[in-house]
Amino acid sequence: MLKVKRVYEAVEKKDGVRFLVERLWPRGIKTEDLSMQAWLKDVAPSDSLRRWFGHDPLKWSEFQKRYRAELDGNPNAWKPIPEAAKYADVTLLYSARDTEHNNAIALMLYLEACHSQEGKQ
């Protein structure tokens, strides 16, 4: 099971394996406070895509499309996530204030779509 959570929320046992999926380190957070498996900064959107999007809900659909293209081109960056999900729940950590339009949600939707396509093959 995949879920998303802001890095500023408390660590919980039910989080399972935790991956930080941001290109930039979150402000005010110490490494030891995250209790994470890994920082997968290469899975985050490119700087240019992140700046273009700017968490504008009107750009959400196009952002997801462009981000999926980046993810398609870099499968090694996100492979640890479905591998971990075979054995435990996985939480994708993000730092954005926007809880509905962020790269962790887009990444989760992408990975769920990949998983559902694997099941059809």
Image (cartoon, grey):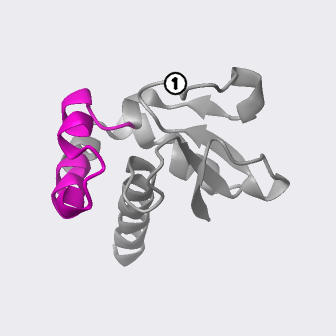
- In the picture of the structure, the residue carrying the numbered disc 1 is 25
| Observer able to see residue 23 | yes
Say how many tags the image has: 1
Check the picture and name the quadrant holding the N terminus: bottom right
Residue 25 position, x and y percent, is 51, 24
Q: With 93 as the anchor, is 10 left or right in this view?
A: right
Quarter containing the C terminus: bottom left
Q: Is residue 3 left or right of residue 96?
A: right
Residue at left offset 17%, top offset 40%: 52
Q: Given the image, on which type of amino acid does mark 1 rest?
A: Trp
Q: What is the magenta range?
A: 44-68
Asked whether 48 falls inside the magenta stretch, the response is yes
| In front of the other: 91 or 102 | 102
- Dominant secondary structure of the magenta stretch? helix
Query: In the image, residue 93 lies at what x, y percent?
Result: 57, 44
Instruction: Residue at 26% x, 28% y: name it.
Output: 47
Closest to the observer, 58 or 112: 58
Residue at 21% across / 53% down in the picture?
Answer: 63
Task: Give residue 51's quadrant in the image.
Answer: top left
